[in-house]
Amino acid sequence: MIRLKRAYEPALKDDGVRILVDRVWPRGISKEKLRLDEWMKDVAPSTALRKWFGHDPKRWSEFKKKYRAELRKQPEALKKLRALTKKRVTLVYGAKDELHNQAVALKEFLS
């Protein structure tokens, strides 16, 4: 079971394994408060893709295609992530847009 949660929402016991899927640390939040089990930068979009997308909903479909292509180039990271998703997992992200972000696209990719 894969859940999604913004980094700025409180960590809960039922989140299971909490994995940050951002390449950069979310602004203004401490490591203690975020309470992560993993920070998987290798499954985050590249800096170039992240900047190109800019959370523009008009680019969402194209972003997902490009992001999937990047993910396929990270077989070891994906293998590790898939193993973790056999338990309850929460993908943690920093984006304000809860519908158009890499965690949404990653969950879709893994399903």
Image (tube, rainbow, N blue to C red):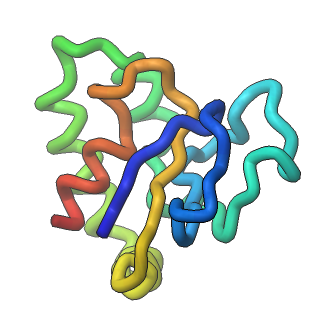
Tell me which corner region of the image, top left, top right, bottom left or bottom right, holds residue 30: top right
Q: Quadrant of residue 36?
A: bottom right
Q: Give coordinates of residue 110: x percent, y percent.
A: 23, 66
With respect to residue 16, does 64 lie above or below?
A: above
Q: Is residue 15 visible?
A: yes
Residue under the point 65% across and 31% down: 8
Give the residue displayed 52% in from the left and 63% down from the top.
14
Please say if 60 is above or below 77.
Answer: above
Which one is nearer the viewer's eye here, 15 or 24? Answer: 15
For the N terminus, the image quarter is bottom left
Using the image, determine if residue 60 lies above or below residue 93: above
Across and down, in percent, residue 82 comes to 34, 80
State which quadrant residue 20 falls in.
bottom right
Residue at the limit of the structure toward the front, as seen here? 13
Residue 13 relative to residue 63: left or right = right
Could you tell me which quadrant the C terminus lies in?
bottom left
* Nearer to the camera, 33 or 72: 33
Answer yes or no: is residue 76 visible: no
Q: Position of residue 75 (x, y in %)?
A: 35, 79
Residue at left offset 12%, top offset 30%: 61
Residue 97, percent across and down?
A: 39, 20
How many numbered markers are drawn? 0
Task: Write the residue at 30% across / 53% down.
Answer: 106
Give 13 or 7, whichever is nearer the viewer.
13
Query: For this view, does 12 lie left or right of residue 101?
Result: right
